Image (spheres, rainbow, N blue to C red):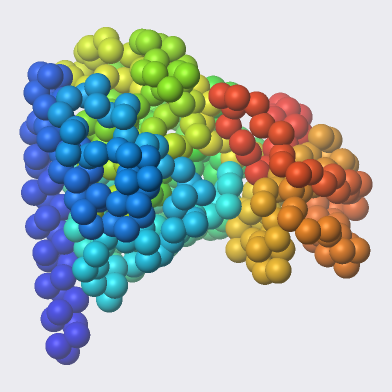
């Protein structure tokens, strides 16, 4: 009973905090851009100094680089701060990258999906949970979602009290791996106004909807897409099959969304109060609409700060003002996370998680501790190449195990294993764990 009351009050506090933050960012999103920039820089300085004073990793890193965070005053100073890589997070997780005095009992450890690289763990404290809830709702609100609208999340259920933390009884979730009959049953009974999901799953469902000539009984008001880059061929097919416009958003699990699309569909508005986004070309800020590497500073995360975090995505930015009235610049992703499905010999689409997620032998010991990098390349439906960068020589049993695993999921295909010291990667091109040329030839599926 006491536990129940404690849980209820925890959710009530989270809801209050969420609503306060949401109210603030909704109220401020039409402020003059220079005002938002001022707010951003104040928040940036605060989290930067906090990280230096409270996180062992940042203290050590900045001291080593002879960087003094107290000198941070203007936007130009951002470039002086050493950037943060995913490798550094992995190497220093957990203790050296958490802030002092964190009450671990109140926190959860989450991880990225690992669809395009090895899963990365990160910490979420109660404050961050509330911010995340607020950002999620902000993204929906900008797309036109209202509290009485029904939202269906296509994702593996992670939270049983999803409605409670949103203060509504209108948000539902279902696994995107569900079969099409189950999904259609839910579409028919729930009559959702909005559907939320990752492009690759939405695309897979779109193909199935087309095959069945399915039409939504109540037209959708929109589709909320996140987590991966939305390539045009997918966007067109999803919008056509679902008969609704897509509202794209950009971010990552670690920092939650940092930009989202409005009803004018001109690109994704930066959420300036929450994140400082840099687009860099040769270590300098890229010019307007010039493609560059994306770095994100999370302005709200004090439990595990992300400062100048290199996402390895490539984006462009427009400084033009959008007709919707939101004043922040617009981001367009040029080369972000694209999740390639693999195609089995008998034409089934196989999720990349099969090879990158928790059931994959690449993810599990002992391979995980030996492997530096790996990549699955599907040249044709019948040809798979496993590119592996290993510290040690791979033994015959492991090799056979990988071939067997691949054939088990994709059919009797030809599997070639290629060993590297380091996997080749082109500059300004995103590294992908799963590359399927069979999948990219989308019309043939
Ligand atoms: Zn707009």
Q: Which residue corresponds to the image point at 44% horizontal and 12% vertical from the top-left?
A: 290
Is the C terminus in the top left, top right, bottom left or bottom right quadrant? top right
**Residue 124 placed where, x, y %?**
31, 60
Going by the image, does 14 lie left or right of 261?
Answer: left
Q: Quadrant of residue 92?
A: bottom left
Of 421 and 105, nearer the camera is 421
Of 445 and 192, nearer the camera is 445
Above or below — where is 89 with respect to 201?
Answer: below
**Residue 422 placed where, x, y %?**
72, 41
Q: How many marks?
A: 0
Can residue 276 be seen?
yes
Residue that sits furthest to the bottom in the current view: 1
**Residue 285 placed where, x, y %?**
36, 18
Q: Which residue corresponds to the image point at 55% horizontal and 44% vertical from the top-left?
A: 201
Q: Quadrant of residue 145?
A: top left
Going by the image, does 397 lie left or right of 193?
Answer: right
Q: Which residue corresponds to the image point at 28% horizontal and 57% vertical from the top-left?
A: 55
Q: Which residue corresponds to the image point at 11% horizontal and 64% vertical from the top-left?
A: 13
Going by the image, does 383 lie left or right of 370?
Answer: right
Of 280 and 408, nearer the camera is 280
Above or below — where is 435 with respect to 264?
Answer: below
**Residue 341 placed where, x, y %?**
66, 42
Is the N terminus in the top left, top right, bottom left or bottom right quadrant? bottom left
Can residue 40 be seen?
no
């Amino acid at each position: 009973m006491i536990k129940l009351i404690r849980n209820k009050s925890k959710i009530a506090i989270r809801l209050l905090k969420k609503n306060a933050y949401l109210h603030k960012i909704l109220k401020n999103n039409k402020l003059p851009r220079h005002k938002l920039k001022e707010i951003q820089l104040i928040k940036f300085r605060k989290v930067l100094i906090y990280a230096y004073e409270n996180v062992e990793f940042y203290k050590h890193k900045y001291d080593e680089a002879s960087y003094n965070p107290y000198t941070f005053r203007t936007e130009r100073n951002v470039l002086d701060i050493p950037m943060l890589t995913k490798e550094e997070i992995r190497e220093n997780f957990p203790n050296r990258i958490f802030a002092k005095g964190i009450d671990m009992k109140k926190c959860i450890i989450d991880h990225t999906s690992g669809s395009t690289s090895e899963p990365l763990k990160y910490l979420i404290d109660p404050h961050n949970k509330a911010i995340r809830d607020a950002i999620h709702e902000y993204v929906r609100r900008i797309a036109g979602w209202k509290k009485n609208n029904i939202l269906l999340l296509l994702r593996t259920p992670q939270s049983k009290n999803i409605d409670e933390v949103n203060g509504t009884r209108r948000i539902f979730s279902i696994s995107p791996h569900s079969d099409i009959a189950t999904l259609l049953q839910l579409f028919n009974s729930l009559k959702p106004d909005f559907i939320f999901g990752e492009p690759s799953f939405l695309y897979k469902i779109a193909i199935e909807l087309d095959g069945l000539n399915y039409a939504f009984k109540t037209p959708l008001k929109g589709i909320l897409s996140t987590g991966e880059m939305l390539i045009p061929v997918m966007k067109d097919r999803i919008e056509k099959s679902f008969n609704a416009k897509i509202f794209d958003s950009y971010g990552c699990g670690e920092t939650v969304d940092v930009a989202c699309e409005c009803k004018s569909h001109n690109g994704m508005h930066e959420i300036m109060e929450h994140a400082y986004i840099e687009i860099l070309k040769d270590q300098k800020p890229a010019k307007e609409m010039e493609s560059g590497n994306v770095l994100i500073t999370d302005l709200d995360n004090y439990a595990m700060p992300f400062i100048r975090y290199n996402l390895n995505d490539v984006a462009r930015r427009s400084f033009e003002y959008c007709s919707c009235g939101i004043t922040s610049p617009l981001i367009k992703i040029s080369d972000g996370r694209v999740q390639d499905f693999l195609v089995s010999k008998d034409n089934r689409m196989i999720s990349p998680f099969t090879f990158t997620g928790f059931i994959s032998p690449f993810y599990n010991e002992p391979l995980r501790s030996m492997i530096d990098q790996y990549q699955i390349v599907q040249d044709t439906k019948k040809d798979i190449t496993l590119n592996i960068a290993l510290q040690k020589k791979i033994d015959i049993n492991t090799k056979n195990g990988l071939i067997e695993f691949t054939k088990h999921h994709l059919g009797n295909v030809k599997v070639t294993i290629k060993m590297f010291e380091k996997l080749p990667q082109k500059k300004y091109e995103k590294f992908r764990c799963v590359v399927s040329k069979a999948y990219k030839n989308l019309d043939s599926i």
